[in-house]
Amino acid sequence: MGQDGIRRGGLRPPPLATIEKSYYTSNVEKFYEAASRSYVLRRINLEIKRASSSSIMGPSGAGKSTLLSILGMLEARWTGEFEL
Ligand SMILES: Nc1ncnc2c1ncn2[C@@H]1O[C@H](COP(=O)(O)OP(=O)(O)OP(=O)(O)O)[C@@H](O)[C@H]1O
Ligand SMILES: [Mg+2]
């Protein structure tokens, strides 16, 4: 109980050392619908471990920025799931 009478600490996240993954995606997909359905991302399954660094590489137009937008929760229309 704090001095202000409010109980704190009930919703603390687990200690960092117990978290193995920081990013995990499962079948993330994104497409644009024009004359036909055009996939920018298809079946993206990745795992980025806690406290590691990763790079996303690919030719221009491969979907790198689109993937980062999804992971940064800036994209509205996509399918699949990810845990942060
Ligand atoms: N509104 C849209 N309608 C249709 N296709 C789109 C639209 N916006 C983006 N795209 C396509 O999505 C694909 C992925 O684009 P993205 O910007 O994610 O690629 P990138 O790997 O980041 O490229 P770069 O290395 O040039 O930054 C591209 O082929 C692009 O043409
Ligand atoms: Mg880009």
Image (cartoon, rainbow, N blue to C red):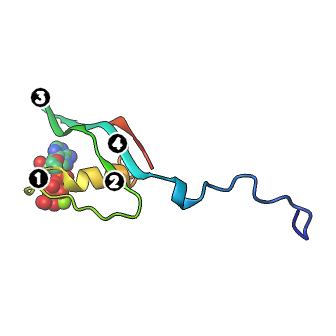
Q: CA distance from mark 2 to mark 1?
A: 22 Å
Task: Say whether disc 1 or disc 4 marks the residue closer to the N-terminus.
Answer: 4
**Residue found 75% across the figure and 58% down from its top:** 9
| Of labels 4 and 3, the one closer to you | 4
Q: Is mark 4 within 8 Å of ligand 1?
A: no
Q: CA distance from mark 4 to mark 2?
A: 9 Å
Q: Say whether marks 4 and 3 touch (CB < 8 Å).
A: no
Location of mark 1 (residue):
61
| Of labels 3 and 1, the one closer to you | 1
Task: Say whether disc 2 or disc 1 marks the residue closer to the N-terminus.
Answer: 2
Task: Say whether disc 3 or disc 2 marks the residue closer to the N-terminus.
Answer: 3
Local SS, label 3: loop
Badge 1: residue crowd in 10 Å (few <14, some 14–19, many ≥20)? few
Location of mark 3 (residue):
36
Local SS, label 1: loop
Location of mark 4 (residue):
25
Q: Which one is nearer the viewer's eye here, 9 or 82?
A: 9
Local SS, label 2: strand
User: In the displayed structure, does residue 19 sit left or right of residue 24?
Assistant: right
Location of mark 2 (residue):
48
